Image (tube, helix red, strand yellow):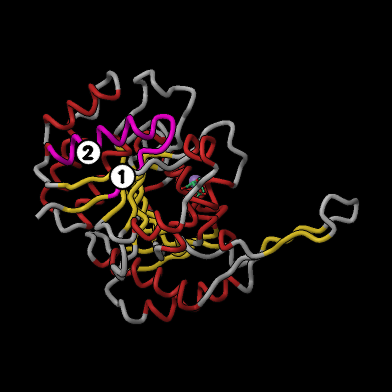
Amino acid sequence: MAHRVGVIGGDGIGPEVTAEALKVVRAAGVDLDTTDYDLGGRRYLSTGEVLPDETLDELRGYDAILLGAVGTPDVPPGVLERGLLLKMRFSLDLYVNLRPFKAGASRYNDGVDFLVVRENTEGTYAGEGGFLRHGTPNEVATQGSVNTRLGVERCIRYSFDLARGRARKHLTLVHKTNVLTFAGDLWQRTFDEVAADYADVETAYNHVDAACIYMVENPARYDVIVTDNLFGDILTDLGGAVSGGIGRAASANLNPARTGPSLFEPVHGSAPDIAGTGKADPRAAVISAAMMCDFLGEADASARMLNAVDKTDDVEGTTSQIGDAIAAAC
Ligand code: IPM
Ligand code: MN
């Protein structure tokens, strides 16, 4: 039976890379029934709408959502981030943001093969805070970090399960427990308690600043990393940079409890400067789509897609030429 997928191509290079991702999914033999949604900066600028509640409710009915990228230069910061991306992450309870990184040895290090599990519904992203005396010389701005036992624990349990299924069975908690003594304490305590249920998984802890050094100099120490929302945001851009660039950085925004659809998107943005030039690398979108197939129970097709991305590693060309090469290798 066809999987029902809501497709949000979005802005800039978003629709271009999404088209290639769908091409590759079909070449891998996965039957999709797709419906396009016009959301993003262009829609906002023409109608003033970001993500109407009716649209969100409709999206809840799909098996998965595939997103390209949203953002146009004329939209003020925060409108699409909070109103579209974070609204979907929070409303659909996409509490795990899973980001894989893989690359061969380079002049910087001996190769990369790790996954980051970024908590995706809490922390500083929760939107706690506000202004006092806005715009005056005595202005106060606060932006708190929300960490719940439930939110932290479900993310940590997901990470232990993930690590258990991998060859190395190694999980590193990344935080800043030496300074964030409240949130860090909750994370560390929960991590230690859950670890007791996973005696077969080896654990480690790194402060986030040190993790930035290790990720560049010795990424081989990492297998699975679990971390809070903001640290995960920053660390995964670094992960992209040390493993072949952001054009390869994929992500799965997962609702592991499966109370609704999960959402799959490349980490790169809409790159308006190269939109329409055919210069966008569709690989991050293809890898995200492979993660979608895996989550939909199409493990074989997903493995073929990832293998095809590996085999066509040195293919250069336009967005659609790269997509064609990957599709042919599936
Ligand atoms: C990401 C992006 C988003 C984030 C923005 C666009 C809201 O940077 O997916 O990493 O900060 O999570
Ligand atoms: Mn980011």
Q: Quadrant of the N terminus?
A: bottom left
Which comes sooner in the sequence, label 2 or label 1?
A: 1
Left or right: residue 145 versus residue 205 is right
> Could you tell me residue 323's position as x and y percent?
22, 29
Q: Foreground residue, 158 or 297?
A: 297
**In the drawing, does residue 16 fall left or right of residue 176?**
left
Seen at 27% across and 33% down, the residue is 19
x and y, in percent, of residue 321 in the image? 23, 21
Front residue of 205/142: it is: 142
Q: Amino acid at mark 1?
A: Val
Q: CA distance from mark 2 to mark 1?
A: 10 Å
Instruction: Give the numbered dot on residue 22.
Output: 2
Q: Is residue 76 left or right of residue 29?
A: right
Please tell me in which quadrant of the rendered image residue 131 appears.
bottom right
Say above or below: 158 vs 114.
below
Badge 2: residue crowd in 10 Å (few <14, some 14–19, many ≥20): many
Q: Position of residue 300 (x, y in %)?
A: 10, 50
Q: Magenta segment: does it hold 204?
A: no
At 35% from the left edge and 44% from the top edge, which residue is drawn?
A: 37
Task: Please give the range of residues in magenta.
Answer: 6-26
For the C terminus, give its image quadrant: top left
Residue bearing mark 1:
7
Q: Nearer the viewer, mark 2 or mark 1?
A: 1
Residue type highlighted by circle 2: Leu
Front one among 218 and 74: 74
Q: Is residue 242 visible?
A: no
Label 1 element class = strand
Image point 53% across, 52% down: which residue? Answer: 83
Q: Are the two marked residues, 2 and 1, in contact with CB atoms closer than 8 angstroms?
A: yes
